[in-house]
Amino acid sequence: MLRLIGQRLLAMVPLLLIVSVLTFSFTALLPSDPVDLIIGDRGSEEQYQMIRERLGLNEPFVTRYVTWLGQAVQGDLGTSFFNSVRVTDAVMLRMPATLSLTFASVLISVVVGLGAGVAAALRPRSWIDRLATVGATIGQAVPNFWFGLILASVFAVSLRWFPATGYVRLAEDPAGWLRSITLPALALGLSTSAAIARQVRSAMVGVLQQDYIRAARAQGLPARRVIFRHALKNALVPVVTVLSFQITVLLGGALIVEQVFAINGIGSLAVAAVRQQDIPMIQGIVLVLVLVVMAVQLATDVLYGLINPKARPA
Amino acid sequence: MKLSHVRPSTLAVVIPSVAVLATLLICALFAEWLAPYDPLQQNLMDMLQGPSAEHWLGTDDLGRDVLSRMIHGSRIAVIAAAEATGLAVLIGVPVGLFIGYRGGWWDWVTMRLVEAIVSIPGIMVAIVIIAILGTGLHRAMFALGILYSTAFLRLARSVVLTEREEVYVRSARVIGASPSRILVRHIFLNIAPPLIVQVTLTVGAVLLAEAGLSFIGIGVQPPQASWGTMLNTAAAYMELNAFLAVPPGLAIVATVLSVNLLGDVLRDSIGRGIRLPEATPVHVPASAPARSRSSEPMTPRADDALLVDGLTVTVSPKGGQPVPVVTDMSFRIGRGETLGLVGESGSGKTVTGLALMGLIGAGGRIAGGRVLLDGTDLLSLPASGLEAARGSDIAMVFQDPTTSLNPAFTVGSQIAEVLRVKQGLSRRAARDRTVELIDRVGIPRPAERADAYPHELSGGMAQRIAIARALSCGPKLLIADEPTTALDVTVQQEILDLFRDLQDDFGMAMLFVTHDLAVAADICDRIAVMYCGEIVETASVDRLFSHPRHPYTSGLLSAMPHGASGTPPLPVIPGTVPPPGSWPPGCRFASRCAHADAACAAPVPLTTAEVPGQQVRCVHAAALTLEAAQ
Amino acid sequence: MTDALLRIEDLTVTYGGRSLLGLRRSGVDAVKAATLTIGAGETLGLVGESGSGKSSIANALLGLVPASAGRMMFNNTDLAALRDGYPPEVRRQIQAVFQDPYSSLNPSMTVEQIVTEPLKIHTGLDPAARRDRAEDLLRLVGLAPTHLGRYPNEFSGGQRQRIAIAAALALQPKLIVLDEPVSALDVSTQNQIINLLYERRDATGMSYLLIAHDLALVHHISDRIAVMYLGHIVEEGPADRVYHAPAHPYTRALLDAVPLLDPARQRARRAARRSAPVSDLPRAATGGCPYRNRCPLAMPRCRAETPPVLPVAGGGTARCFLAESDIAAHPARPEGVTAP
């Protein structure tokens, strides 16, 4: 297993490099001159040149990239053009809320998706299968932020069971954290639950037709055992793949759902950065998000290796 | 796909979906005429009104008519979907085809770039692109087009890569077809169907993404009316007029749902990707239902391990009438005896084996008969009783050992599990017994091999494991379904030796299902020859090979590769096996039989021939002189 | 042999030797220095178990995989040297029929399109002439011209294989590679196809490379037989000699492994056979004779040296020291094998 992790970590290095090059060169394409953004129209030519020099903008592109990457590796993502906040600090301040929301919704989607998918697969064409299928189909068509709006207007505005806005830190008040995260996580987890349910259903239906299931039944093993031990473990293999792919969807979705519930996460930071053309901030956010995605993909790879012996290196 | 072939449930999905999309398109095209108000016209006297006669869907924060804004918003939705999806196809498909076909460095570099883009949350990619280009509908859609082009690129590439490995593409290369001809003729034809499905998925995704971007204020810009910007407004005034969020949200859901559903229907109906004509075999189907004339009923004997009497199995194809696949199946197996069930594909031999286990899959049904295992009728047992009998009294070995063992567990744990569940052994005892069994089936270093996963074993080794598991609880009857067909001949010989050896030890009766008469000759005491779902002849091995009484048996014997003599023409059975559902009402072999005449048009029972123990289903059996094995 | 149509010399096919990121991986040799000859109008049967490399020879010959070493002289052209694909005049002379008739025909093309495709590519025939030719071809393979408009999925396995043969015959090639042409078919249909292939060869004088795993079946229509074991050609010779008096222990093991159709004689043979314990040694031996780990007659010498290609009485060659030491020590016919 350690070897698998080592291999995957090694494989991530070139990917991270490519992402960093992409991020850096794309943001270099931003149409506006950052110096103008910083000093406005009133700056003198000398000031202008001084700031360019300070930002290192007179260096060649490759030099700037290498410098940026070197600092990034040490955890320094530069300084915002606008409020001289260190990008690392700003991102780290906002990250817990976004990650809480994302992982809470992962949890919800796995529980709901797995339950609905297995129930549907066990009785194909029954009412429970139809219900799960219809639910999953609709779930994938509902915009998560709109679902958030509806949840908020019902459970927060009308019923007042949950707060409509804001985020409470887990460390400050665990109960409050749970209350603040429930509705957004439900809103965000809907489409992923649907995707997982569909995947579980089709994987289970496929696995249940396999020879080894028939062979297990031919050995007279109880049906429950065949389903929950022999079939489910194999059906989980594609589910893990879906999860590893859905994590980018969930993180992206979190950026939008946050806005509905006025959670100060990465989403509002990113939108502000785009509006202000704050290059270091955008670069930093993208890089950190990709790091999160890769960490999750590493975890799912390990999980994949655990449930699928064929994926383990010989 | 003709409409008459579409199932009603499919139509129930297609019609509303098409209706929703048609409405959307009409609204988009004729928004100016359909909208009751100017979508931008403000009326600060009538702000945030609920639905009323003047304003069917109420008004927004600036007193603008929501219905009119909805109708104009549908135009934005159509433009957004068309622009982004069109761009994604135009970029993704050619690049994907190119790198798929070209391979090498082009492929490697492009795919690493795609992987990098895909590892960034899509919304973030769009946000960065919008940061470069600026906000607004067309720029946002350009961003989404680039983002979703990765999906089309990967699709096109994977179609090229899979099609390249197809045998018919290899055939085309052997013929000498040029790469461009192969791309057009074989690959492009096959990319169209999944492409259409991907387009529907992308349209749905684009609509959701456009709404999301507009919602956070970097997509379509106010005052232009899009469903996303309307939701942005609704969010701000949620406490004052919650209804504002309903119309645009429902519009998005209905549109995306319709597109997705159409995509699902398309995917299901085009299957692997090619529009196929309905599969109608060239054989002329017989209209009369195929039913065997019942043979004499079997009477149980004390030394029977298994007695099957008048077993009939039907299979219902999806939405079709049940078709008989096994009829009038009667045979007995004595204790410690091996009966071979021999037949070609489609003869019903495998279904018979599964029916005895109570394991015929969905759509299959046992329509009649008795299956007495040691005097107990398995067919009359409740499900729990049958489950208890399986593994303990009756067990099965399957054709392909690499698929009949669960890939997710070690082989040892799969044997130990049976021992623990069926015999209540402790973990420790089950493990010890497992290692003993693995040793018994002739696998060296059994303790070590117990911890191997199925894919780590050769086919022959895996089959030995499967046999060890089947015999772990000492069943009275072992059903072996083509257990050596997937193996090389030298391995086949070892497995046959193992079966014989184990039978001496465990004393179980065996039903050995095979298509190979020579294998049956080697392992069986008696043989039942099946053709089109019924036994046509049964006899002791020696008798069957020296004095076959059925023309089909004789034909099979002389057609065996080392049965036939010298140089071609080799003896043949003319014609092909008719599939279930098109069996003739009389003798099912008649159309291929040199001896057939008018007497063969009526159903034929299985009757005892001149020698006791030999039974034949042929009206001419007594009169024919048939060729025996060489 | 002067009139050889095809002479394969020291052909080696290697898979997986691709360089990835500059790191060169060592490949696996599917075929190791194989030498074979097919005369004009002759059928060479190539026999082996799974993984023996027999299909790799076919794929190399058809230009579907590159040869990593050796020569394939076809009518004075070295096919192994044609790295950029075969020119049309070579292509049209070598055709193929593959094992699985279900995947070897494009499901979206009609029988007419499938059968006339080679004519479209290689001849200047107009559509009417092509259709005439297609009708002739279908009759030749035992189908009716009315089948031209149908799709492959309307046919049984045997009928599909007839369509594949019709397409292979379209250009009147000099050589057809038959890769397990009947192993996916039912017993009662196999001989129909074998007879058809035999009859067509007799009528046209073309050559076959017939690849199969069943020696008995191959023996019926082959002039010569070559036996492969793990990439090596271990025995080669006239079909009757190889079938009735195999010189290599592996060939003999292959023959003995197929049960006899006579139950009494099969029982006798079984009783005589020593049931050897399952070997824990790897199937492929490294160094020396590749078969020595499974060979009942292996000697210390087989570990030390690789047996050379040795002539065998009755024609052909075998890569076994036993062929060198004492040909007479082998019974002329392996005990129990049926004489035709």
Image (cartoon, coloured by chain):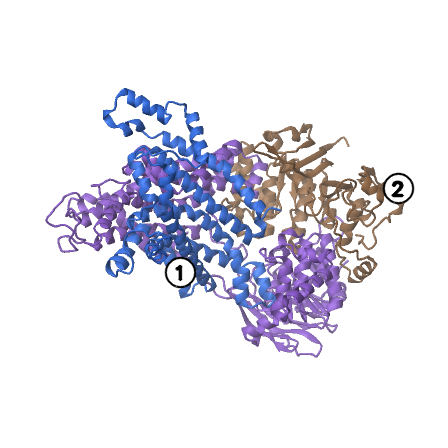
The image's mark for residue C325 is 2
Helix or strand or loop: what does disc 2 sit on? helix
Q: Is residue B7 left or right of residue B359?
A: left
Which x, y percent locates residue A226?
55, 64
- Any part of residue C293 in sight: yes
Q: Residue at x 40, y 59 (%)?
A: A133
Report the chain holding disc 2: C
Q: Is residue B331 left or right of residue A245?
A: right
Disc 1 crowd, CA 10 A, few/some/many (<14, 14-19, 20+): many
The shade of chain B is: purple
Disc 2 crowd, CA 10 A, few/some/many (<14, 14-19, 20+): few
Mark 1, residue position: A132
The shade of chain A is: blue
Which x, y percent locates residue C244?
81, 48
The amino acid at mark 2 is: Ser
The shade of chain C is: brown
